[in-house]
Image (tube, grey):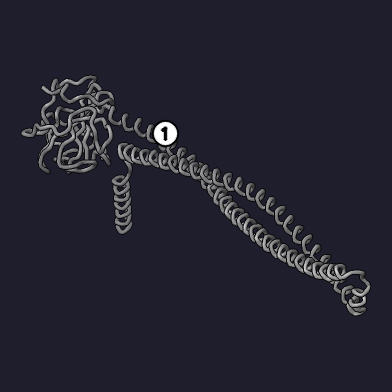
Amino acid sequence: MKRKRIAAALCAAALCIGMFSASFAETPAEKVERLRQESAAAEENVEAHEAAVQTAANQKEAYTQKVQAIQQQIEIQKQLVTAQKEVLDEACRATADKLLETERTRALFEDRLVAMYIRHNNSDLATLLSVSTFAEAVRYIDNLRAIAQSDTELLETLRKQSEELAARQAEEEAAYQQLQADQAALEQQGAELADALQKAEAAYSKEQADLAAAQATATQTGEELKKAEEEYAAWVAQNDNSSPEFTDGVFQWPLPGYTRVSSPFGWRTLNGKQDFHRGIDLPAPQGTRIYAAASGVVSFNAHSSYGNCVKISHGGGLVTIYAHMTAHAESLYEGCTVQAGDLVGYVGNTGNSYGNHLHFEADLNGQPVSVYNYLG
């Protein structure tokens, strides 16, 4: 007896686990909706990476142009430095030559002074007494004074010229140093721009790789979505009714007393995008009873977009779908048969819905058709 109880408990646990797994298993419709959202997100990701690649390319091009421009400036600056070096060298040579000339003149002047001193010691009076006339004596003295004054003026002129050349040399030296500093600054800026360009090129390469990965993901997701849509279309098109044709003639209205259509069948704009509406939306209070439009076989397929929904196969490839319900009728089960006017569920706001309403849809061989084609 104890073993039987244990076996029964294990069977019950297994059944519960199976029911739990089934209740959380992804249905074909949920898979379609999930992949549709993933595909849209993947496409948006591709667009974002395309924009990022373009931004990186623009930045790379901008740094390339800056590097080229700074390199041209550096070359011009080098030419200016070379030219200024030549000017500075010339100034240095001129200063050196003038200093040499001054020193030579100073040496001659000093020699002349020594000679005049010696003559003075030998007595200029004797020299004067040796002249024949007074006029010759005056000329002799004037000549001595003129020579001394000329030498003094020459030395002063050479001193001033040397100072002027030294000042010019200092100015040229300062200009040369400034040009060298400017060149160093340009080269530093060039190195920074080259580093920025290298980083921009790396960022561009990374964005290209990310774009390729995003495109691969989008392609894969698109392929998975296409396959899932085919599987969902197969579920919609599946005719659980063995009847080769639809025999009820016309549909009954699924929501008696509620005839206003808030969104018709066909193309519409939803959230700013074009969207094909597969059915009609009928607003009604939550819990309003929903009835089968025609007789057929019931199947369920919870859908993240349609929420709680019921499909009824009417034969001949024709099915109707009742979506966004709060719940389906308790009497329904997978594969059961209903008649036109039987309760199938209650109006709700489940799935991708913006208020309590019934989404009423008709599909023929998997393709949506207007329900008005079958309403009397």
Residue at numbered disc 1: 223
Reply above or below: 8 against 103. above
Q: Position of residue 121 (x, y in %)?
A: 90, 80
Quadrant (top left/top right/bottom left/bottom right) for the N terminus = bottom left
Q: Position of residue 264 (x, y in %)?
A: 17, 29
Which image quadrant is residue 49 in? top left
Residue located at (14% from left, 22% from top) = 248
Q: Residue furthest front?
A: 133
Quadrant (top left/top right/bottom left/bottom right) for the C terminus = top left
Q: Residue furthest left?
A: 257
Q: Is residue 298 left or right of residue 29?
A: left
Reply above or below: 287 against 298. below
Q: Secondary structure at mark 1?
A: helix
Give the number of marks.
1
Residue located at (21% from left, 43% from top) = 350
Depth check, front residue: 124 or 263: 124
Type of amino acid at the residue the image marks with label 1: Glu
Q: Position of residue 69 (x, y in %)?
A: 57, 45
Depth check, front residue: 325 or 354: 354
Reply above or below: 236 against 60. above
Which image quadrant is residue 158 in? bottom right
Which image quadrant is residue 300 in? top left
Counting other residues with Cα less than 10 Å from the Cα at mark 1, is it few (<14), some (14-19), or many (20 or more)? some
Q: Is residue 201 left or right of residue 145?
A: left
Q: Position of residue 290 (x, y in %)?
A: 12, 36
